[in-house]
Image (cartoon, coloured by chain):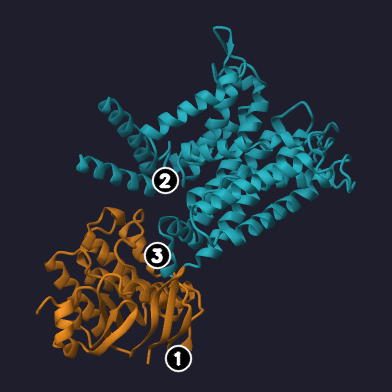
Amino acid sequence: MTTVLEKVRSGREAVGERWHHAPRWVRWVLLAAMIVFFYALPNREFYQYLGPIPTPGANFTQVLFTVSIYVLLAVGLNIVVGFAGLLDLGYFGFFAVGAYTVAVLTSPSSNIKTLWPWLLVVPLAIALTMVSGVMLGTPTLRLRGDYLALVTLGFAEMIRISATSSAFLKGQRGFNQIPHPPGKYADGKPFFGVLDARPYYWLVLTLIILVVIGVRNLTHSRVGRAWISIREDEDAAQLMGVPTFKFKLWAFASGAAIAGLAGALFAGKQNFVNSQNFELLNSIIILAAVIFGGSGNIVGAIVGGGLVAYMIERFRGIELFGVELYEYRFLFFGLVLVVMMIFRPQGLIPNRRRAAEFKDRRKEVIVGE
Amino acid sequence: MLLEIEDVSLLYGRIQALHGISLTVDEGEIVALIGANGAGKSTTMRAISGIRPIASGAIRFNGEDISNLRADLRVRRGLCQAPEGRGIFPGMTVLDNLDMGAYTRRDRAGIAQDLDRVLELFPRLAERRKQPGGTLSGGEQQMLAVGRALMSRPKLLLLDEPSMGLAPMLIQQIFTIITEINQQGTTILLVEQNAQQALARAHRAYVLETGRIVKSGTGAELLHDPSVKEAYLGVA
């Protein structure tokens, strides 16, 4: 058992080593190929040759859109949980703030009937989620540990409950006819339509790439070093002159902004938003995705978000002994998580520093035996 | 006077940890603060570095009242603490840890110069520069904490139990280094349970008992004081 595990482990490490030692141009070519692959993925002419990858029970391009939104959310939450080490259990609440900002300001069924175009509201939605992040963070980030987790949990539930019961946010009836993003084909047909999910997926994919570049630059700067030092030892970070509260608030607000962007994209695609879209379970799924992929590593967050969202959808339409597997998707999801936490607690693609920490602990355990 | 603490009290919830402490540190000195477990030594350090807020009294650094200043801003004023025990960043390499020490600085040339100096003071750290801090031995972590604090080029270096948990050989070594750092121009306030070594090295010292200063004097005076001998040096 252990030998097999060791083999898998060393095999994976070898791949990682190879990647890190490959010449720069090889890495760029592979990266470009990967990006091209993901842009081509939603085309039927392409994915029909991919065997079992397309989902049998659901429109594959729709699934890809959902997956891409989860990836964006995982990248955002990874800043908060992975880099700054703040446990946010209500991340989906910011997604809801973004989606509802768009819904209220653009939909004809909204009470205030501003009917603004989608594109104009997106920056506003991002700004508003950031503000809500700062408002939530200012009193709570001075506290440490479990308080933040509880407060964020409460925040997401507050948003969901006010969405369900307030007349202004329309509850289950929701907002309809939310406008799509702008853009037309040469023949005058809208680029972002109702039936074809591909343009939305491409839009989210492009934004993911931009966000990842931004986050990567941030983490390699003084800001990133400050975040990591706070995660590792908050007191020591402060003793080194890091304004810890300010940087925690920054991490929290940037994470919230990304969730707000995702919410705005979601509203623009779905063209309908109601209170059922924002269950607590979603926050938990994204958190699980970040930890599953490897907390503190951007690639890990992308892979985690993608795999988790895809796995859940993949069960749709599969029947085994007359039982619809989709009904039991969270059972499998839970099972996978438990197995992961036993055999690979640092996540699929951990951050290198974290990997070192875990390796160190493993050694300590062996010495202890 | 570089540091002046006047009548400082500090509370942990309803428990009073410090009862009106006053002490001073002059430029160029090594001042030691000795006392038993729970006497309030580390608490005094936390009050000075700003990790714990004080209830009353005043802390002045370089003539400026810093009683209510945030901890990270105190570092920018030139006051840096090497925290007790494992206060390093376990997942960062030795070099990254040292780099974090220079977080408040932007003068690259000066930082590189100080890095060389720290690696010269602690050759063990130079050998392990690429290793994560958490994989170092206790003594090496202690050295890393001191080295990291030096990287901020402090005017006043606060050392919280630098000899804690070290083998006798290493204790000698770390105190030699402390003297060396001081001779290179850094003022040092030192908290120690190892009273023998601390008093031998310090210019002046204070004895702390249950949150009060009960005695003060030069290192040599206290080293030969009968009551100090009995209580802290294990000689009857």
Which chain is cyan in the rendering?
A
The one nearer the camera, A332 or A34, is: A332
Quarter of the view holding residue B183: bottom left
On screen, residue A246 above or below B34: above
Gap between marks 3 and 2 measured at Cα: 21 Å
In the picture as drawn, the residue positioned furthest to the top comes out as A321
Image location (x, y in percent) of residue A132: 68, 55
Which chain is orange in the rendering?
B
Q: Decide: marks 3, 2 in contact (CB < 8 A)?
A: no
The residue carrying mark 2 is A351
Q: 10 Å neighbourhood of mark 2: few (<14), some, or many (≥20)?
A: many
Of the 4 image quadrants, the one containing the N terminus of chain B is bottom left
Of the 4 image quadrants, the one containing the C terminus of chain B is bottom left
On screen, residue A360 above or below B109: above
Three-letter residue code for mark 3: Ala
Gap between marks 2 and 1 measured at Cα: 45 Å
The answer to whether any part of residue B152 appears in the image is no
The one nearer the camera, A239 or A124, is: A239
The residue carrying mark 1 is B63
Three-letter residue code for mark 1: Gly
Q: Are marks 3 and 2 on the same chain?
A: yes
* Lower position in the chain sequence, tag 3 or tag 2: 3
Q: 10 Å neighbourhood of mark 3: few (<14), some, or many (≥20)?
A: many
The circle on residue B39 is none
The residue carrying mark 3 is A236
Image location (x, y in percent) of residue A45: 64, 20
